[in-house]
Image (cartoon, rainbow, N blue to C red):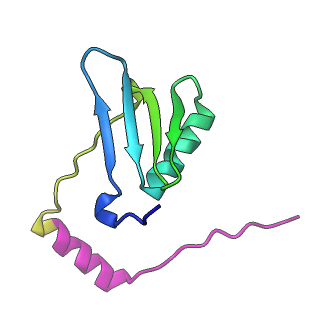
Amino acid sequence: MTKLSKYEKETIINWNEAENLASIYTFNASLKRRLADFSRKYPLLCRLERSTPEGSVTYVLDKSRLSIRLVPPYSEERKAAAREYAKEHGFQVIVAEEKIA
């Protein structure tokens, strides 16, 4: 078994207009985790169909559960506002502390 390059580690989402199922083939670790979590939570809507020794998985899910989100680029005005906000406030991480009684 040869190691695959990053270029060869694809994600393919496939569906057609006639069927209600979509197929997702991926090597992407984040997407694999999300699909595994979703299939455990909703086994009637999503199932693992195949996994390979190379690290890919194929899930089949109800295509009504799948969405593709296109995000437009930030405008120059929004970038400038974000820069100004960062200059004023810096980067602050707020940590919620839990009190144990």
Task: Please name the residue shown 17% across and 62% down the image.
Answer: 74
Residue 87, given in percent of the width and then of the height, sits at: 29, 85
Instruction: Tell me: 60 left or right of 67.
Output: right
The extreme right residue here reads 101
Task: Please name the residue shown 45% across and 29% down the image.
Answer: 61
Instruction: Tell me: 36 left or right of 57.
Output: right
Residue 9, given in percent of the width and then of the height, sits at: 35, 57
Is residue 72 highlighted in magenta? no
Is residue 96 highlighted in magenta? yes
Task: Please name the residue shown 47% across and 36% down the image.
Answer: 59
Q: Which residues are magenta?
A: 78-101
Residue 68, given in percent of the width and then of the height, sits at: 28, 40
Q: Up-down: is 55 above or below 77?
A: above
Front residue of 92 and 62: 62
Task: Please name the residue shown 31% across and 43% down the image.
Answer: 12
Q: Up-down: is 86 above or below 52?
A: below
